């Protein structure tokens, strides 16, 4: 089932992201470099084989939520920053 495969991909990508935690926390490395490492080491794991997945809206949302959380973490942006409601 595709949802199972997506969950497995998110778990593997989460592990890869956690293993690079030391890199994300470093302030002497430019954000652009961190972004390139993220795309190479994490996003490639997340999306491996995705060309063949028949995605539902929920599956797409789960992938995007994981991706955006990682990017916010790398950039050091809190969820509520700039949310002036």
Image (spheres, rainbow, N blue to C red):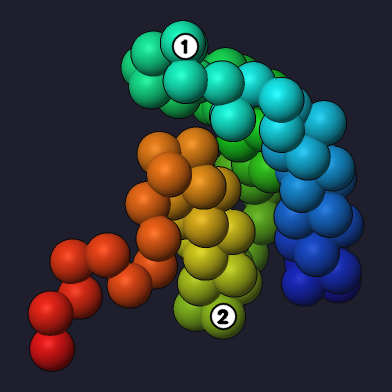
Residue 78 in percent (x, y) is at 40, 60
Mark 1: few/some/many CA within 10 Å (<14, 14-19, 20+): few
Alpha carbon distance from label 2 to label 1: 35 Å
Q: Residue furthest front?
A: 27
Q: Is residue 45 visible?
A: no
Residue 71 in percent (x, y) is at 46, 44
Camera-side residue: 76 or 2?
76
Marks 2 and 1: which is nearer the front?
Answer: 1
Q: Which residue is mark 2?
A: 58
The disc label shown at residue 29, or none: 1
**Relative side of 27 to 19, left or right:** left
Q: Is residue 55 visible?
A: yes
Dot placed on the residue nearer the N-terminal end, 2 or 1: 1
Name which quarter of the figure residue 18 lies in. top right
Quadrant of the drawing holding the C terminus: bottom left
The disc label shown at residue 17, or none: none
Residue 35 in percent (x, y) is at 45, 24
């Amino acid at each position: 089932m595709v949802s199972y495969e997506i969950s497995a991909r998110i778990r593997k990508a989460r592990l890869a992201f956690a293993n690079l935690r030391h890199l994300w926390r470093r302030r002497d490395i430019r954000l652009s470099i961190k972004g390139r490492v993220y795309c190479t080491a994490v996003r490639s794991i997340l999306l491996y084989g995705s060309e063949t997945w028949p995605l539902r809206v929920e599956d797409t949302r789960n992938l995007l939520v994981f991706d955006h959380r990682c990017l916010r973490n790398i950039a050091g942006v809190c969820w509520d920053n700039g949310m002036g409601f």
